[in-house]
Amino acid sequence: MKTLKNKILIVIALSFVAVACEDKLEPVDPNNTGDAVALANDKNVKTTLIGAYDALSAGAFYGGNTFRNSEILAANSEIVFSGTFNDVADIYRKEMITLNADVAALWTNAYRTINVANNVLSALSVVNEADRDQVEGEALFLRGVSYFELIKFFAQPYSAGNVSTNLGVPLMLVADRNSVAQVPRATVQEIYTQIVADLTSAEAKLDEGPRPGKATKEAAAAFLSRVYLQMADYPNARDAANRVITSGNYSILSSYSNCFNSGTTAEDVFNIPVSTVDGVNNLVTFYAPTASGGRGDIEIQNSHLDLYEADDDRLDFFFPDPGTGETRTGKWTNQFGNVKVIRLAEMYLTRAECNQRLSTSVGATPANDINNVIRNRVGLSPLGVVTLADILLERRLELAHEGERLHDAKRLQESIVEGAVVFPYNSDKLVFPIPQRDINVNPNLIQNSGYN
């Protein structure tokens, strides 16, 4: 009997030890911690901020797909998508459905970035005072650019008018981050107002660059120039671009080809770093031939090549795919090359366009920016008289296959022509559907026209 009792006591004791060990060794999911842990101190808030950059750099977002989608949706018979990914092919054909996974991935990663940025903004009081403005500025920058991508893809363009009634996307700010409320879509104007507020405040708080892959004062100004262009606010677009140019922290490279397939260059105002251990460049995945580690899904057509002058160095940047003979762009052939989000050349083009429209010469004349900066670098002779059409063509060629084509077409009210089919700049087919899973969860979300 005594032996039996001793065995029972040993079993009970071992049970307590086991329970104690389980309590002590039970892992904590760092992605599922409350504010009391994740946002408790300076170090944790800064670590959380890194998570926002991680969401921004996802392949479905600034890791390449966002820029690819702009180009293929506005293909204009100048490029062909011949890949086998059905969801991407549907975007190219303007046949998206509400279950399109690529569309949903953009929405998810953008709101993930916004949510993390809001978490950081909610905990600024614990950030070291010396770093507080920088941390706040980075969070505002990340939130602002995320809303900018959402509004460009999931709503009618600003140029379509009715911005005070056209539906944008749900506006989630700091106060909404832990809310279970089913937030409806804000208007296009409300979203643009928030974007301008976020980026303006960010520019005032951020340190100057360059800082590869990080928000800077100049990066915020560069994005503001893009935002103001979409709004046709040419004075503010011009001045924001001019602030980047005159900062003296960035410079135009002597060779156009050196802008791409590399790490950070002196021309990169904002980029997404890619290395052998971190980051992804999905533009390479879809644009590059198989010999360069890509899929060869995007083919450049003669109708695009015909836009260039015969002695334009940018024309020489295209090459035949050794495997298929199809024409590829040389911009995206290094899988470890950074994703170039904004280059300084764009700021010169923006300044030139706005000065031309306004009959001003802030920073320089349009002729100087176009002839001495843009055309000179690619071996072209100067134009005697620079017109708005000249500037817009230079912009189209300089920034080709970098993700701006759809948004430029919309703001300029240009139609997209695919064979015999014409898609007006405000066509429902050029707007992404609100993901069906979000409609299912939130009945207050109204679906975009054409997807009901």
Image (tube, rainbow, N blue to C red):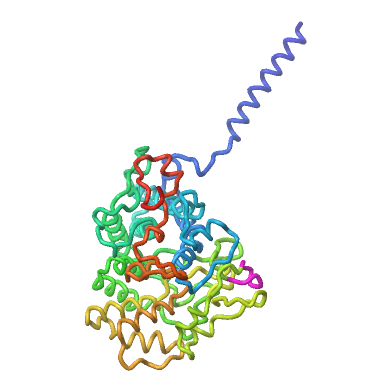
Magenta highlight: main SS:
loop
Q: Residue at x 71, y 18 (%)?
A: 10
Outermost residue, top side: 1
Residue 197 seen from this side? yes
Q: Please, which residue is most extreme toward the left here?
A: 359
Front residue of 433/206: it is 433
> Which span is picked out in magenta?
288-295
Residue at 29% x, 58% y: name it.
Answer: 192
Residue 293 lies within the magenta run: yes
Residue 125: tell me if it is visible.
Answer: no
Q: Is residue 393 magenta?
A: no
Task: Please identify the quadrant where the N terminus is shown.
Answer: top right
Residue positioned 30% across, 69% down in the render: 229
Question: Residue 382 appears in which quarter of the rendering?
Answer: bottom left
Query: Toward the viewer: 316 or 297?
Result: 297
The x, y position of residue 404, in whole percent, is: 41, 69
